[in-house]
């Protein structure tokens, strides 16, 4: 019996893309000797995405969908897909066709060679806007300088995961998901494939600068506590530097020199006031994460699905 491949697609307002991507995936599998299923996760959109996928599910026996009760975000949508896929391996990709399904063949070859995770690396795309390229560049730079788990530039959530990996991942009870970091952290035998991304087929990108920033902060703080260490080191550095003032103060006192240091004083106060707030903020972010995690709410809520018995 042929092995089953699950294809997971998170979709948020992608009405015009679904038909096209399903079509292309089917073409790819037509030339391969695998069974496959497609699982689209409708992440609380406002357009006709749900209608489109419901219609597809009526005519295709290997097409499944999950509808969220609201918009939970890309990462929870991906998690839902992984939780409910039943293939021997799971391939995840975006709905907008920036991730070419034609790469599946190569990914599956590597999987057959024994790699448990086959991830993809986006080659620099000259058609991407300057702003997007720059934000992406700084995103990874910042991420890696602040975190313990290294994330390679250009890796998105376009990857193949073997069943063993998916099962490990399913048991994670993390509230705050940053899947590409988690996957790196998991280990296993990983293989990278470089590819040239295509342009988004229809619709607009759902990631704006604010969302990117949030993802960056989340990326760092959900993978490591290094920012807290940095705060502690800064504290040590400045307290020891402050000790150097003591001889000067004593000298100034005995030599009767007037200290007219209003400017330097106010600058110091403002600087350290700011620094303390930043560090408090960092601590706050981690406390917030603990708070959310202690509630242990689910990552997502399913409103409807055509998956039999919610396997
Ligand atoms: N997405 C989602 N929920 C969201 C935002 C995005 O499921 O809240 C999906 C979206 O439909 C797409 C993928 O995540 O399949 C990547 O989103 P997008 O293409 O907007 O990101 P970009 O490629 O611009 O980084
Ligand atoms: Mg995209």
Image (spheres, rainbow, N blue to C red):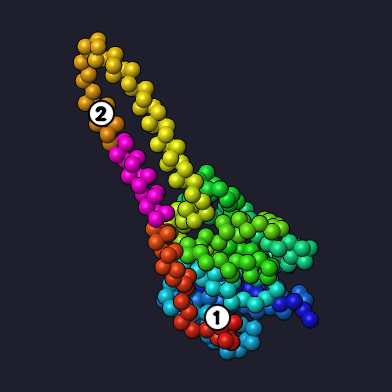
In the image, what residue occupies the spot 63% across and 67% down?
168
Say left or right for 267 vs 15.
left
Circle 2 residue:
265
Report the disc number at residue 26: none
Magenta stretch, main secondary structure, is: helix
In the image, what residue occupies the spot 29% across and 39% down?
273
Check if residue 10 falls in the magenta segment.
Answer: no
| Highlighted range, magenta | 271-287
Query: Of residues 214 and 222, which is closer to you in this image?
Result: 222
**How many numbered circles does the render carry?**
2
In the image, what residue occupies the spot 61% across and 60% down?
183
Q: Secondary structure at mark 1?
A: strand
**Above or below 83: residue 135:** above
Quadrant where the C terminus sits is bottom right
Q: Quadrant of residue 306?
A: bottom right
Residue 184 rendering spot, x and y as whole percentages = 61, 56
Quadrant where the N terminus sits is bottom right
Query: Of residues 115 and 204, which is closer to you in this image?
Result: 115
Q: Nearer the viewer, mark 2 or mark 1?
A: 2
Circle 1 residue:
65
Marks 2 and 1, how far apart at CA: 62 Å
Residue 265 rendering spot, x and y as whole percentages = 25, 28
In the image, what residue occupies the spot 33% across and 41% down?
276
Q: Is residue 42 visible?
A: yes
Q: Secondary structure at mark 2?
A: helix
N-terminal of the two: label 2 or label 1?
1
Residue 256 rendering spot, x and y as whole percentages = 21, 11
Query: Of residues 131 and 44, which is closer to you in this image?
Result: 44
Q: Quadrant of residue 166?
A: bottom right
Residue that lies at the very extreme toward the top in this rendered image = 255
């Amino acid at each position: 019996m042929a092995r089953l491949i699950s294809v997971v697609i998170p979709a948020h307002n992608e009405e015009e893309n679904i038909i096209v991507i399903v079509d292309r995936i089917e073409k790819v599998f037509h030339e391969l000797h695998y069974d496959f299923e497609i699982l689209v996760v409708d992440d609380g959109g406002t357009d006709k995405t749900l209608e489109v996928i419901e219609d597809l599910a009526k005519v295709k026996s290997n097409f499944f969908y999950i509808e969220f009760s609201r918009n939970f975000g890309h990462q929870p949508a991906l998690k839902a897909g992984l939780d409910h896929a039943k293939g021997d391996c799971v391939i995840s990709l975006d709905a907008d066709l920036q991730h070419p399904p034609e790469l599946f063949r190569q990914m599956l070859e590597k999987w057959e060679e024994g790699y448990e995770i086959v991830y993809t690396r986006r080659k620099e795309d000259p058609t991407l806007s300057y702003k997007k390229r720059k934000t992406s560049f700084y995103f990874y730079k910042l991420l890696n300088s602040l975190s313990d788990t290294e994330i390679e530039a250009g890796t998105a959530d376009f990857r193949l995961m073997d069943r063993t990996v998916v099962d490990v991942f399913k048991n994670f009870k993390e509230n705050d998901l940053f899947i590409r970091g988690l996957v790196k952290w998991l280990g296993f035998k990983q293989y990278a494939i470089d590819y040239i991304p295509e342009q988004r087929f229809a619709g607009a990108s759902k990631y704006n600068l604010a969302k990117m920033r949030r993802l960056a902060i989340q990326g760092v703080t959900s993978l490591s506590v290094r920012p807290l260490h940095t705060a502690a080191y800064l504290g040590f550095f400045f307290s020891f530097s402050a000790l150097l003032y003591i001889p000067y103060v004593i000298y100034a006192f005995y030599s009767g020199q007037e200290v007219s240091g209003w400017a330097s004083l106010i600058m110091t106060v403002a600087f350290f006031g700011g620094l303390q707030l930043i560090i408090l903020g960092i601590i706050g972010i981690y406390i917030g994460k603990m708070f959310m995690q202690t509630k242990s709410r689910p990552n997502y809520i399913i409103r409807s699905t055509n998956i039999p018995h919610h396997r």
